[in-house]
Amino acid sequence: MFIRAGILAASVVATGLVYRRLNHVAAGAVETPRIEGVTMPPTTTAEASGFRVDDAETSFQDITHYNNFYEFSTDKDGVAPAAANFETNGWQVSVEGLVRKPRDFNLDELLKISPPEERIYRMRCVEAWSMVIPWVGFSLSKLLDVVEPLSEAKYVAFETLLDPRRMPGQRSDVLKWPYVEGLRMDEAMHPLTLLASGLYGRALPPQDGAPIRLVVPWKYGFKGIKSIVKIKLVATQPRTTWSEYAPNEYGFYANVNPQVDHPRWSQASEQRIGESGRRPTLMFNGYEEQVGHLYAGMDLRANF
Ligand code: MTE
């Protein structure tokens, strides 16, 4: 469990790995359509140099069978089977609030906003495990540009689908539904912030947040809200699921920071899934050159 289960993060990882070794979790029928026309983003400028990291990519099997998605299961190995038949036909995303041109997008319209790019990002979960994922998507800023934010917009609030029939985990009150997240406007407009529709060149499998999710590589993984139906530009800091659940453990910013420990475990190192041993956690998950300026002068211990 993510929280309050009395299990330390390291043992959560260990349990998952041992479980998979002992049970040889089947490859699982994760067959989603290939995404046409995937382009490679430029990596020449300082900002863009974070678009593709050199670290070895985590296997497709691990990315799609070791998941956090409480709408389906609180058991990492249980998400893939529970989400297997998730229906995303007719998906709509409303982009609204403090914008000049609010609009409902169907998925086709949304995906046509900008060519799909492959971005190879590190992902560091607050539980101290990490992966390297070849996402497909485009910068969230491209979508926000289409709706024309007003100057009063200071934050962006995101919301996951609320439908206990299709998301059976929502029948329990383990979290307050729908899952919500938020970013400051400058974070949302940063080119690294990705609206992802795929991974490994294929459409997102349900367990990874089909059909569209957020990826913010310098923040803990819980900021990467899945299966988004609403994006609202707002004037004040929006509520977020985990910081509301345990405000002393999960902050609004949630920037990866090896110097600021979680109250119940160290954040200094991490378990890269598929590797043995631990590796040091990098400041801003290794994206300090790209994003450090966003937090200049800010007390990162107070704003964790
Ligand atoms: N989004 C929703 N809607 N529900 C969730 O439970 N879990 C978060 C995040 N997005 C979650 C979510 C957490 S804790 C993490 S670490 C990542 O998704 C995991 O993404 P992955 O399963 O694709 O690796």
Image: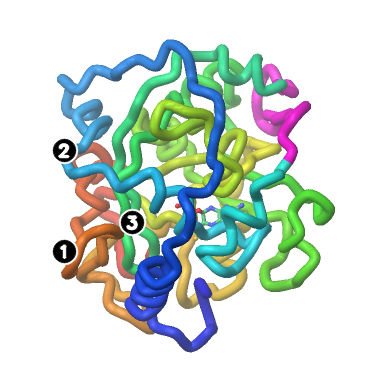
Identity, as a three-letter code, of the amino acid under mark 2 = Asp
Q: Position of residue 257 (x, y in %)?
A: 27, 62
Q: Position of residue 165 (x, y in %)?
A: 84, 53
- Mark toward the start of the polypeptide (1 vs 3): 3
Between the residue at mark 3 and the residue at mark 2, the CA separation in whole angstroms equals 16 Å
Q: Is residue 23 left or right of residue 164?
A: left
Q: Viewer-nearest of labels 3 and 2? A: 2
Identity, as a three-letter code, of the amino acid under mark 1 = Arg
- The answer to which image quadrant residue 273 occupies is bottom left
Query: Which labelled disc corresponds to residue 11?
Result: none
Q: Position of residue 125 (x, y in %)?
A: 38, 60
Tag count: 3
- The answer to which image quadrant residue 89 occupies is top right
Which residue is labeled 1 in the image? 279
Q: Secondary structure at mark 1?
A: strand
Which residue is labeled 3 in the image? 124
Q: Secondary structure at mark 2?
A: loop
- Residues under numbered marks 1 and 2 in contact, where contact means CB atoms less than 8 Å apart: no
Which of these two is toward me, 288 or 299? 288
Q: Secondary structure at mark 3?
A: strand
- The answer to which image quadrant residue 170 occupies is bottom right
- Residues under numbered marks 1 and 3 in contact, where contact means CB atoms less than 8 Å apart: no
Could you tell me which residue is drawn at 36 percent across and 80 percent down?
Answer: 11
* Residues in magenta, as a range: 87-105
